Amino acid sequence: MIRLRAGDLAGARADLDAAAAGHAARSAMVLAFADAGLGEVSRHTGDPDRARALLTAARRRLDETTGVPSRIRLLPLTGLARLAVCCGQLAEARGFLAEAFRLALAAEPPLIQDRPSIAGATEALADLALADGRGADAARLLGYAAAIRGAPDLGNPDVRRAEATARAVLDGDYEALRVPAGRLGPDAAVTKVTALAGELTGARFG
């Protein structure tokens, strides 16, 4: 995923193709991770059909595998959500994000939430907020994600794109919305995100 985040899509594809080779010798989790990564490469290179097929395959593999951490399970879900938003399939995006938040908000051993997982789902939710015409909420969500993670994920091309879109929509109001959200404590930010996730997806959490 490092090459993908750096914008080296050809290198990312080569690495992930290599990881997917020799199926019999590799675990389902590794194969799912490779499929999810290849799906993300396809999404970024404008091949939505291949992206959907790969991300769906990754999701299926992970659903059939026990002991998978939530942050790994989230990879295909957030990818599918962003793909659905890009394709104008907002009802599908809401479903994927509702599932993502159920996973992200669930406590894992030792009974603590995985904050990077919540932050990742929150950043994907910002895409849905933008598609819904809720630019102010998108700015807040990006701030909340940074507060939950401890820093903004500026190495993520999706986050950079969402930030640029929100800035364009809100003009000078973007920082006035994002900065206070980013100054919240992690627990307070999770509370705010949970409420917005419910509004945007139509699901109930907790």
Image (tube, rainbow, N blue to C red):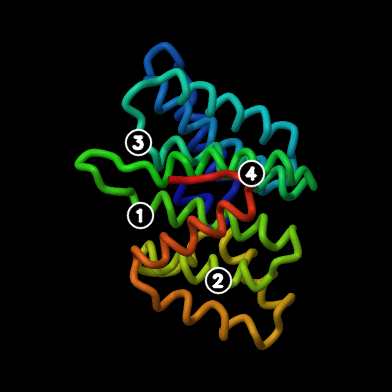
Tell me the number on the disc at residue 69: 3
Residue 140: which numbered mark, if any? 2
3D distance between C-alphas at marks 3 and 2: 27 Å
Q: Local crowd at mark 4 within 10 Å, few (<14), some, or many (≥20)?
A: many
Name the spot of residue 21 as percent of width and height, x first: 48, 22
Residue 71 lies in quadrant: top left
65 vs 131, left or right, is left
Identify which amino acid the numbered label 4 is placed on.
Ala
Q: What type is the residue that disc 3 sits on?
A: Pro
Mark with earlier residue (1, 3): 3
Q: Amino acid at mark 2?
A: Arg
- Element class at badge 2: helix
Helix or strand or loop: what does disc 3 sit on? Answer: loop
| Front residue of this view, candidates 51 and 56 | 56
Q: Position of residue 146 (x, y in %)?
A: 43, 68
**Disc 1 from disc 3: Cα separation:** 12 Å
The first of marks 3 and 2 along the sequence is: 3
Q: Earlier in the sequence, mark 4 or mark 3?
A: 3
Secondary structure of residue under mark 1: helix
Instruction: For label 2, count other residues whose C-alpha is less than 10 Å away and answer few (under 14), some (14-19) or many (20+).
Output: many
* Relative height, residue 22 to residue 175 (above, below): above
Q: Which mark is residue 115?
A: 1
The C terminus is located in which quarter? top left
Residue 123 at what x, y percent from top left?
54, 58
Task: Return the disc, 2 or 1, that comes first in the chain's sequence.
Answer: 1
Residue at horizontal 53 percent and vertical 35 percent from the top: 36
Amino acid carrying mark 1 in the image:
Arg
* Sooner in the amino-acid sequence: mark 4 or mark 2: 4
> 10 Å neighbourhood of mark 3: few (<14), some, or many (≥20)?
some
Cα gap from disc 1 to disc 4, whole angstroms: 19 Å
Q: CA distance from mark 2 to mark 1?
A: 17 Å
